[in-house]
Image: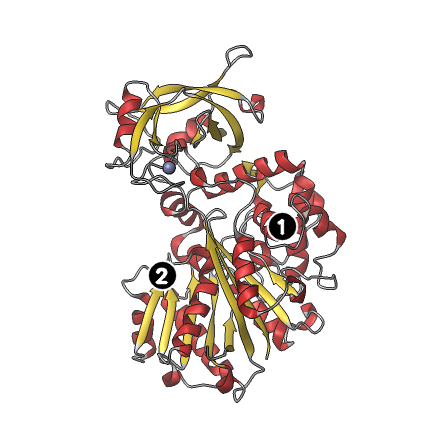
Amino acid sequence: MTATAIAGIAELPQGRMPGVTPMALHDRLARMAIADAGLRVQDVDAVITLSPRSDPYLIHAAALAEFMGIAPPVALTVEGGGAAPAVMVDMARMMIGGGRANTVLIVSADMPLSVVSRGSYIQTLADAGPVHPDIERPFGPTVPALFGICTRAYMHEFGATEADLAAASLHDRANALDHPNAHMRKPLDMAGYLASPMIADPLRMLDCTPVSDGGAAVVVTSLERARDLRHKPAKVLGAGFAMNQLHLSAATSLTASCAGTASDRALAQAGLQHADIDIGLVYDCFTIALLINLEDLGFAPKGQAGAALRSGLFDRAGRIPINPHGGLLSHGYPGRAAGIGNLIEAVVQLRGDAGARQVKDPQVTLTHGMGGVFATHGVLLLGRS
Amino acid sequence: MSYTKPLPAIDNWNRPFWDATREQRLVAQACEPCGTVFFPPGPVCPHCLSAKLSWKQLSGRGTVESWVVFHQVYYKGFADEMPYNVAMIRLDEGARMLSNVVVPNDSLHADMRVEVVFAPATEELSIPKFRPLTPGEG
Ligand SMILES: [Zn+2]
């Protein structure tokens, strides 16, 4: 397959964006990413977007292309939940490899805070998220309730405590303090964590992500072409995907999932070993997601992610830095676009442009995304070319 | 007073389940070749993909695998019951089922043995909830 690379990226501060429409946000991110690559808007011959919850469209990507004044041969909008960033980059890769496109623009943004409202966004997740409408919804669960059920099962099975959940929350917050685009930038300590109210006991508010306006854009092109552009290319080394169910009632386990299968597939495709990974960007819509995903992705033994977090193993100066940007928990959760921040951080770190949060000399990054309640997983490996 | 909690969207796959609740019976699809009992209802067995399925009357007994106590009002119908629990029940026949346990929240515990009880909802269906079994009841 033709080697591909991420040549351009764009991200704005995550949080509240009053006075901006979702389409204008997409347009702005798109132009920033294209300019970052050193390309022109008319070079784009494929646009891939997610359907923003805050701006429902039939073929959102075509609406964006029209708004930008371009008519690329390919304009498509995909649904991939939190695994979407890996899905979209892999699609771009196949389009470029197959000769369908040369310059693929991916824009993933949403405005659940300013346009939809936080409350109604969470309501929508309850109504049309991974909650089964027929046999789960009548009992009043919501997405935090389903993750809370996984949390209590995890605590029961492994003897984990709220200190382990707190370790995830504090880890991400400490990293976000150094990120100008992060949504949650107030220092947090254990007392602050414990003071946060219960939402879905055992999950507190600070075990859940904030709801953010935001997102990002990336430009994918062939590695050969990317080498002539503005930045050091972030080469796509491999991608892997896995799923086992959508609804938690149908899950084989409440405390483990197939993230590792996705990761193994990506590593096999890249011809790499787990030990080659220098930074992990691990999807963490809740603290429990960070713990379980870290374990299933092979970064910690089962039941020990909390202890590993406390040990400093995953700090930016640790042996395997995890979520140096603050993860979804503190960098932000831009609705449908959640997870794109992990991809952006991988590229920024590989370029060496992360400033105060720069990890020393990373060669290979693992970006993980998860859809539903541990339902679907996408892993993307990027590297210095 | 009308029922204000979320009601299921009834379709051809789940209709036998909800019809049975009207008669205070808990049923699930069972695979004839491999015996798997499963939710959510669907056209094939998730274990062996056989379409030879039948609706089976369950014992109505199970074990609390996990639960949350929910403190936010996202469904108005639950507002009077705050905070309410949502539990994952492992039924004795093997399937997992989300439900509510009719018990004070602080008395919930892992591996609690429970039995189905039916809360009236509409003329068409009841909501299957669970109550604790006392030791000796199973
Ligand atoms: Zn079967």
- Locate residue A237 relative to residue B129 in the image: left or right: right
Report the side of A202 relative to A62 (left or right).
right
How packed is label 1: few (under 14 Cα within 10 Å), some, or many (20 or more)? many
Measured Cα–Cα span from mark 2 to mark 1: 31 Å
Q: Chain of mark 2?
A: A
Pick the residue in front: A256 or B105. Answer: A256
> Do the residues at discs 2 and 1 belong to one chain?
yes
**Letter of the chain that mark 1 sits on in the rendering:** A
Instruction: In the rendered structure, find residue A51 and report the number of the disc placed on it.
Output: 2
Q: Is residue B109 visible?
A: yes
Quarter occupied by the N terminus of chain B: top left
When asked about the image quadrant of residue A322, the answer is bottom right
Q: Amino acid at mark 1?
A: Glu
Residue B1 seen in render: no
Question: Does residue A75 appear to the left or right of A152 in the view shown?
Answer: left
Residue A364 appears at what percent x and percent y?
Answer: 62, 70
User: Residue B44's x, y, as percent?
Assistant: 32, 40
Per the rendering, the mark at residue A295 is 1
Q: Nearer the viewer, residue A185 or A318?
A: A318
Q: Is residue B107 above or below residue A79?
A: above
Q: Residues within 10 Å of mark 2 (few under 14, many from 20)?
A: many
Q: Residue furthest bottom?
A: A228
